[in-house]
Image (tube, grey):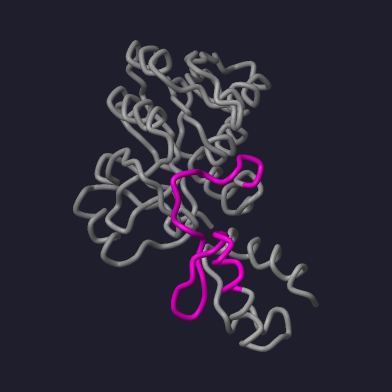
Amino acid sequence: MSQTIRHPEILEIARREGKVTVEGLAEHFGVTLQTIRRDLSDLAEAGRLERVHGGAILPSGTTNIGYEERRSLNQEAKRAIARACAARVPGNISLFLNIGTTTEAVAQELLHHANLMVVTNNMNVANILVANRDCQIIVTGGTLRRSDGGLIGNLATETIRQFKFDLAVIGCSALDGDGDLLDFDIQEVGVSQAILRQSRRTFLVADQSKFKRSAPARIASLAAIDAFFTDRPLAPDLAARCAEWGTEIVISA
């Protein structure tokens, strides 16, 4: 197998797993460790990966990966997280759903919930929930980000400030080891912070790949979240912090 064929698959594995190892890739492709080291060096020189001891990781950056690519990553984990989250969303409440592929999966799981008023700055969420006739949908307005259907900026924030939500379900682009929620877009961070201020309770939905990524802008700490729905147990230190903060951790099956 030539490197032109290996390189795209190596990148796909890195996006899916967050990290690749020399030994794991050598076994996967049936080639030598030296061959994989050359592949990783080539990809690192091209800025596609960042070399670490024993392998490589996705490079730290200031821009998010494409929306369609994010939608296709960890789909089963996102569906499981969404099911677990939706099971904890009662009927007859006001609910905010923000931008993100996992919050869109939650919207899909809410199609049979009754008497919801959903406010969202996510055009995709609004389009999904159109199928639920028992759901009132309010779209915030704002500047449309064509890449993912998100509405951001001052108009979105001002709309959010007109409400007091019973519950908000939010996502994030990355999670730091100390429990900080991170994002790439400063305008989106402002919207997310407004959501947290205007919600009586907040759920975070994020799969384990978010711990393997970095983003430059801080939204808040997990201390501000009532329940965190994810697919893998947290590192012991962070799990202990969440227990101190009163942040419930829900691991989806």
Identify the residue shown where x is 24% and y is 45%: 223
Nearest the eye: 48 or 97 = 48
In which image quadrant can residue 48 be found? bottom right
Residue 56, position as x, y percentages in the image: 51, 71
Residue 156, position as x, y percentages in the image: 42, 17
Q: What stretch is highlighted in magenta?
A: 40-69
Residue 129, position as x, y percentages in the image: 62, 23
In which image quadrant can residue 189 be found? top left
Q: In this view, does 182 lie to the left or right of 178?
A: right
Does the segment drawn in magenta span residue 50?
yes
> Looking at the image, is 23 positioned above or below residue 7?
below
Identify the residue shown where x is 35% and y is 14%: 163
Does the segment drawn in magenta span residue 106?
no
Looking at this rendering, what residue extends furthest in the right direction? Answer: 1
Identify the residue shown where x is 57% and y is 53%: 77
Nearest the eye: 45 or 48 = 45
Q: In this view, does 193 lie to the left or right of 60?
A: left
Nearest the eye: 206 or 15 = 15
In which image quadrant can residue 201 be found? top left
> Looking at the image, is 189 positioned above or below residue 249?
above
Task: Assign the N terminus to one quadrant of the image.
Answer: bottom right
Residue 7, position as x, y percentages in the image: 69, 67
Q: Is residue 154 left or right of residue 147?
A: left
